[in-house]
Every structure is written in C-alpha cells, then in structure tokens.
Image: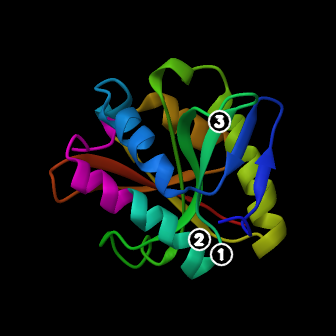
Amino acid sequence: MSHYPILETERLILSAPTADDIAPMHAIVSDSETGRFLGPVTNPAIQFERFARNAGSWMLYGYGSFMARLHGSDEVIGSVGVFHSWRGMGTDFDNNPEAGWILHRDQAGQGLAMEAMQATFGWFDAAYGPRRVVCMIGVGNGASLRLAGKLGFCAMREAVLPDGDRVTLLVRHP
C-alpha cells in the first residue's frame, strides 16, 4: 500500500495497514482493558473481518484507518483514522465516513489519540473537503466521548449493537 499517505506527527507515524499488522492489532484489541468497549474481539475471525473492512476502505474509498507507531519503533500501538463502513445503524449513520481510534492501554491517556486524529482530519479534510463524519463510542467510554467532543463530534443518539452492547452514535459536521 505504498501509494497511500504516511502522516507524521510529533510522536507518531501513521500508515495504511498491511497484512503484517493483523496479528499486532488482534493482540491490542484482545487485551481486556483495551477491548472493554469494542465488543467481542477475542475471536481472531471477527478481528480479521474488522481489520479487512477498515483496510478495504482504502481501496474502495481512498481513505481508511492508519496503523499508529511511535517514532523510531516498528511496533503497532493502535489504529486510528477515518474509514467507510456500513453497520446497519440507519441512514443517519451508514454509508458515511466513520472516525475511529483504538490505542493499546499502555498508550492511553497521553494525548496520542488526539494527536493522531487531528493529523488524520487535517489530511482527510484537505484531500476530500470538509465532510460529515460519524463515529460510534461504547456507552461508558468517557475518555473517547471527551476526545470526540474535542474533535467536534456531537451525539446523535444511542443504539444497541447486535451483540447487545450499547453505543452512542455521534456526528461531526463540516
């Protein structure tokens, strides 16, 4: 995926995913603390489907999730970005660019998600123009809700996923 952008921030390198990133991301989301708001992701097949959906967004729409690495390290510490997804959540949510961020628990609380998402939105808005973007955050995930607010997202409504998890659906208007 060498023709996709590589974004650099003060502390991070953000690049499109490769097949080598599947196992590290599965390890990150399988961690009980990191994955507590992500729904059931201990099954490698479910994580592969999620990873492939996000990676496929690059080919189909020209944007997707980036793999996050600290400068000077090859270790994947998370996934951040804007990807295209259909989740069966309704016309106000589906078929829109969707923002998401997942960092390993050891990297949480350091401002890295904000740094990464600001760089992502800077690139996305420059490449595609300011657009409506949605995101979905597990009910009770106060840290991500605060970050979403700082990024300009407003709550639309709550929803229940097929697995029974409750989420807040949010939108960022141009």
Q: Which residue is mark 1?
A: 62
Q: Residues within 10 Å of mark 3 (few under 14, many from 20)?
A: some
**Label 1's element?**
loop
Identity of the residue drawn at 57% across and 77% down = 59
Q: Are marks 2 and 1 in contact (CB under 8 Å)?
A: yes
- Residue 124, given in percent of the width and then of the height, sits at 74, 64
Which label sits on residue 58?
Answer: 2
Query: Marks 3/2: CA distance?
Result: 19 Å
Q: Quadrant of the N terminus?
A: bottom right
Q: In this picture, is 155 found above or below 49?
A: above
- Residue 63, given in percent of the width and then of the height, sits at 64, 68
The disc, 3 or 1, on the residue closer to the chain's N-terminal end is: 1
Q: Quadrant of the C terminus?
A: bottom right
Q: Residues within 10 Å of mark 2 (few under 14, many from 20)?
A: many
Which of the pair 21/62 is nearer the observer? 21
Horizontal side of 2 relative to 136 (left or right) equals right
- Residue 157, given in percent of the width and then of the height, sits at 38, 57
Q: In this picture, is 32 found above or below 159?
A: above
Query: Marks 2/1: CA distance?
Result: 5 Å
- Amino acid carrying mark 1 in the image: Gly
The magenta segment: 37-50
Identity of the residue drawn at 73% across and 41% down = 13
Q: In this picture, is 161 found above or below 69?
A: below
- Residue 17, given in percent of the width and then of the height, sits at 56, 55
Residue 140 visible in the current orientation: no
Query: Marks 3/1: CA distance?
Result: 21 Å
Which label sits on residue 69?
Answer: 3
Q: Residues within 10 Å of mark 1 (few under 14, many from 20)?
A: some
